[in-house]
Image (cartoon, helix red, strand yellow):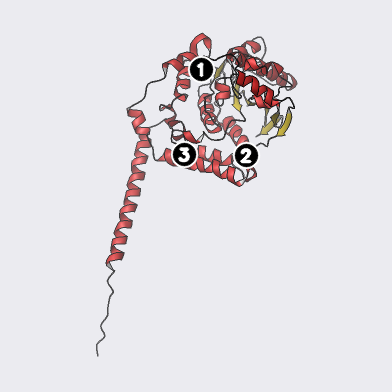
Amino acid sequence: MSTRLSIEQPSQEATTFRKALFAVLLGVISFAAAASIIHLCIRSPLNLYAAVRSEKLAAFAPWQGRATSAIFGSSHIHNGFDPRSFDQTLAATPLATTTFNLGVEGGSQSEQRVLALNFLKTLRPQPHQACFVFLELNAGANFTNNHLVHPRTIDIYDWRTLRFIHQLSPRSLGTQRALGRTSFGIVGSLLYYTNVGMLANRIFTPPLDQQMLTAETIQDRRGLYTPDQPAATAAVFQLFADAGHAMTPAPEPLLPGNYALLSELQRDSPIRGVHFIYVVSPRIDNLSSYPQYPAEITVDGVTTPILSMARADLYPDLFPPAEWIDGAHLSAAGAGVLGRDLARQLLDYYQQHPQPMDCGG
């Protein structure tokens, strides 16, 4: 009796599934390869056009190697810090410096990190000048949701930015808030690595907004952007009335990302003697309550001061209605006061904590 071996043939459905799976995998591999090739063609995504940020970088270009200090952050800095009054206040002191406003309207912690790293590359030793990097501590971690598919997000959310956002998203913030921050970072990073719009941006570069660029450079503004602003409106006066004057402190924790950012900047600085400063920007509702942070933070043996301008009790000149255009943004006059008062607070700090000040020394 002979035995007949029977070999089952794969079903038509199984064969079709395998072919489809192979096609999908081939498509993914091809897409990843194409994305990698495009990245090789785009060496510096930060230099791709991104409205508002590109104008600020263009305004800064003539100051590369000349500016020894810069301040970073959101519109609270972009519209609210005058480097002229800041430098004038420090001019005859050991803290004399040349400052540029690199805050960007709608900005975030993720963006100021990238811009600060970029600024450090431009620094050159400058005898008799101090070097400062000011970071807005109370800026949002990510951009607002309407910027998720904007070049300002896509062009900078590499794996390092994603790691930084994760460090700003501890569970102590609450599950929903931490997950929201991390999710934004993941989507932004996916868009970065799939080069959404990057190649088209490189080939069809939009023109700079010359009106904004002029507004940030005339009269030695050095990045300060104060478009035509009306005098304090009735709405501003109402905000002051509603805020009251309790000035209650609201303790705010420092996050792992706040430490990690300073460590990264200190490590990447090409010269010695750069002083990193966290700044808390003011709002009208600080009259009611203000964020309270520790006075300083120590990272890798280096102590960084946290200078809060959100204290109406300490800086009364910042809080008349005439210095504001809305609840969160100072007027041009208010920007001058902020520059002056921040310089004075910086002087007070370093008088109490004397340190070498020469940039690169």
CA separation, marks 3 and 2?
21 Å
x%, y% of residue 287?
Answer: 70, 25
Q: Quadrant of residue 172?
A: top right
Q: Which residue is mark 1?
A: 65
Residue labelled with disc 2: 256
- The label nearer to you, 1 versus 2, is 2
What's the mark number on residue 188?
Answer: 3
First of labels 1, 2 by sequence position = 1
Query: What is the secondary structure assignment of the residue under circle 3?
Result: helix
Indicate the secondary structure of the residue bearing disc 1.
loop
Which numbered disc, 1 or 3, marks the residue that appears first in the sequence?
1
Residue at the farthest bottom position: 1
Q: Amino acid at mark 3?
A: Gly
Residue 215 vertical placement versus 272 (above, below): above
User: In which quadrant of the rendered view does residue 206 lie?
Assistant: top left
At label 1, the amino acid type is Gly
Report the amino acid beneath label 2. Pro
**In the rendered view of the protein, which quadrant contains the N terminus?**
bottom left
**Number of the front mark, 1 or 3:** 3
Residue 275 spot, x, y in % from top left: 63, 24
Q: Secondary structure beneath disc 2?
A: helix
- Does 212 sit left or right of 327 as displayed? left
Which quadrant: the C terminus?
Answer: top right
Q: Residues within 10 Å of mark 2 (few under 14, many from 20)?
A: some
Q: Earlier in the sequence, mark 3 or mark 2?
A: 3
For the point 65% across and 17% down, the residue is 321
Q: Closer to the camera: disc 3 or disc 2?
A: 3
